[in-house]
């Protein structure tokens, strides 16, 4: 019963990006984690590649903890896959994914200079929402997160971001693209992803998508997205490249 209340409450909180009213079922979560214990990988329980990016958030414990918990969840998936066992079920999203969503939803980074942190939070919520839906959770809505990410990046200049920050932002924006349902929203995300990909020196969709897969990825959930936007993305990126070459 506690799990059902928490799940329904969390679904409502995600539609508004507001704090959930009910706490997660911590005792049941801990039991599930103890039963399926997996040693942490990397310095923060995540891949060594992503661990190198943690310095961007070293003062933001909310995100560091989310990355840690997500890394452990991903290792759980990897272990299940190696054993040939299914992982995408109700127990996984309730005990491994929902607690991370619970910690992030309604926790906006509103301070000046926290654009990357807020974009990362929204990217994580979009990423986690797709996993929840993949595992069979009904009524998962990401409209609020996607709209907030678009509004945030539209209002801010990201051209001065370093390479590491741009790579994380590119990943977050791709999550926004994947979760966008309206063509106008998809078109905006495609243009923005292409702009940042161009700034990073990527000359194709394959390069761009490959870079994003290096960040935070679950093959079973997201690999099917690789070719969905290729035909719309390539002309946008090519136009940017041609414009650049015409000026040189």
Image (tube, rainbow, N blue to C red):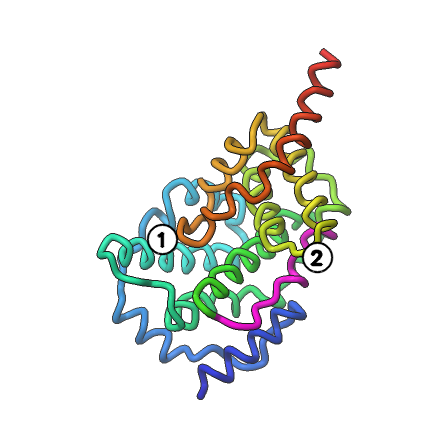
Residue 18: give x, y in percent of width and height.
65, 71
Residue 149 vertical placement versus 55 (above, below) = below
Q: Which residue is mark 2?
A: 147
Q: Nearer the viewer, residue 135 or 173?
A: 135
- Farthest-out residue, bottom: 1
**Depicted 146 relative to depicted 196: above or below:** below
For the record, the magenta segment spans 137-152
Q: Is residue 63 left or right of residue 147?
A: left
Between 30 and 75, the one lying in front of the other is: 75
Estimate the x, y position of residue 226 in percent, counting from the top left. Answer: 50, 42
Q: Secondary structure at mark 1?
A: loop
> In the depicted view, which residue is nearer to us: 62 or 13?
13
Q: Residues within 10 Å of mark 1 (few under 14, many from 20)?
A: many
The residue depicted at 43 percent of the width and 66 percent of the height is 135
On whether residue 212 falls in the magenta region, the answer is no
| x 55%, y 38%: residue | 167
In which quadrant will I find the C terminus?
A: top right
Above or below 248: residue 138: below
């Amino acid at each position: 019963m506690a799990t059902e209340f928490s799940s329904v409450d969390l679904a409502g909180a995600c539609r508004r990006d507001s704090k959930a009213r009910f706490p997660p079922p911590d005792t049941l979560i801990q039991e599930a984690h103890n039963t399926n214990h997996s040693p942490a990988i990397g310095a923060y329980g995540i891949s060594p590649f992503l661990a190198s990016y943690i310095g961007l958030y070293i003062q933001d414990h909310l995100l560091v903890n989310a990355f840690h918990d997500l890394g452990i969840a991903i290792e759980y998936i990897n272990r299940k896959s190696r054993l040939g066992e299914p992982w995408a079920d109700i127990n996984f999203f309730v005990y491994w994914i929902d607690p991370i969503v619970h910690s992030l939803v309604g926790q906006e980074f509103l301070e000046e200079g926290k654009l990357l942190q807020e974009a990362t939070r929204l990217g994580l919520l979009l990423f986690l929402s797709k996993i929840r839906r993949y595992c069979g959770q009904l009524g998962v809505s990401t409209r609020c997160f996607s709209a907030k990410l678009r509004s945030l990046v539209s209002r801010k200049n990201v051209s001065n971001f370093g390479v590491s920050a741009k790579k994380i932002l590119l990943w977050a924006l791709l999550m926004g693209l994947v979760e966008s349902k309206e063509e106008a929203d998809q078109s905006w995300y495609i243009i923005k992803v292409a702009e940042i990909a161009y700034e990073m020196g990527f000359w194709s969709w394959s390069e761009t998508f490959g870079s994003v897969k290096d960040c935070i990825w679950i093959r079973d959930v997201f690999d099917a997205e690789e070719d969905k936007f290729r035909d719309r993305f390539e002309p946008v990126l090519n136009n940017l490249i041609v414009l650049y070459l015409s000026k040189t």
